[in-house]
Image (cartoon, helix red, strand yellow):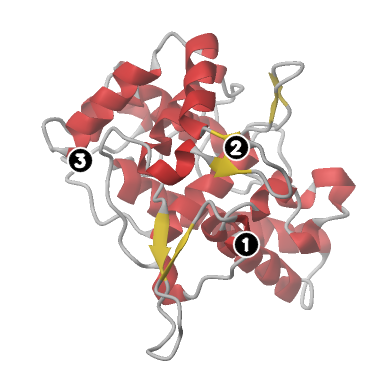
Amino acid sequence: MKLLTLLFLMSSYSFAEVKLRDIGVIGLMSHDLFTWDKHSEVNLENGRLDLSTIFDYEGGSRWQKGGNPKNAENAPVWSITKRLVDLYADQLKIMDEKSARKFTVKYFHKMVFESYFRLTGVRIPKLAINFPVTNTEQAVFRAMHDILPGKAKFIRGKLFPLKEFKLTNFLFAKLYLNEAELDQKIKYFDGEYDPEYLAITIPFSRKKVNLKEVDGDFIAKHSPYFQENMLAELKRVGTAEININEAYFIEHAQTLLAKAICSKENQWIESSIKCH
């Protein structure tokens, strides 16, 4: 607990309204920290918030397409990815590639801090930590898939024919959400996965994936926790029985952020936060 006291400026937290944009921002954050190779069972990402998932994937050849294809697997993540890609492209008109990426990474950090606070109440770290991210931290992030909304609303005027869409429908994966759609409120933790995530259709196949089962297997194998217990804890958070900062596993999510913004030995992260 002394470490966490040093790392974070915590406050008495009553969660703010979580927005759909937060799902996109934190989803992209997760992609930038973790790319799990299920065959070798290692994380292929560098565990730093440097947008390597966009700018370093396949040697940087796909940045205009959002980098790693998983950044285009659902509308919220794609909408945040595309905004960052467009921001980078705009900066290239007035500065060199290295400066443009640093500018874009810094902007992304601002987005992450805002979304992370709405989601968890964790403020900007006072110190960063120069350690690799862990499988347990990834497991905690997977448990927090509880908050993923199965559906979202269209906010595009009275004449637009569709009122909502499923975030798991691949036909809407690269839907570019407008600002009003990104700002729509979503429900907080409730200890359940929305039904849409229990049978995700894989495009052009008959295969379906149960995200809850996939996450549960990972958590059981690669962390000291069990999904059932973690979801029960998140339900207590959602009913305001406990504050999210009292959840027994949340320390790992807090420490993860301090690792993610470490600038040491990373040319893309410019930060006034010291890394130890």
- Residue 144 versus residue 94: which sits nearer the camera? 144
Disc sitting over residue 65 in the figure: none
Residue 11 is tagged as: 3
Local crowd at mark 2 within 10 Å, few (<14), some, or many (≥20)? few
Secondary element at image label 3: loop
Residue at image position (55%, 60%) is: 75
Question: Helix, strand, or loop for circle 1?
Answer: helix
Q: Is residue 158 above or below residue 188?
A: below
**Percent position of residue 91, x then y:** 72, 72
Considering only order in the chain, which callout, 1 or 3, is on the residue closer to the N terminus?
A: 3
Q: Are marks 2 and 1 in contact (CB under 8 Å)?
A: no
Residue that label 2 marks: 208
Q: Is residue 274 left or right of residue 81?
A: left
User: Which residue is at a point 65% across and 33% down the rendered structure image?
Assistant: 264
Locate residue 143, reporting x and y percent. Answer: 41, 29
Badge 2 marks a residue whose secondary structure is: strand
Q: Residues within 10 Å of mark 3 (few under 14, many from 20)?
A: few
Identify whether 193 is placed above or below 95: above
Res. 157 image quadrant: bottom left
- The residue under label 1 is 171
Q: Position of residue 168 (x, y in %)?
A: 53, 51
Q: Quadrant of the N terminus?
A: top left
Q: Characterize the local packing of mark 1: few (<14), some (14-19) or many (20 or more) Cα atoms within 10 angstroms.
A: some
Q: Residue furthest front?
A: 206
User: How many angstroms separate mark 2 from mark 1 (CA)?
Assistant: 15 Å
Q: Are marks 3 and 1 in contact (CB under 8 Å)?
A: no
Label 2 to label 3, Cα distance in Å? 42 Å
In the image as oriented, which residue stretches furthest toward the bottom?
159
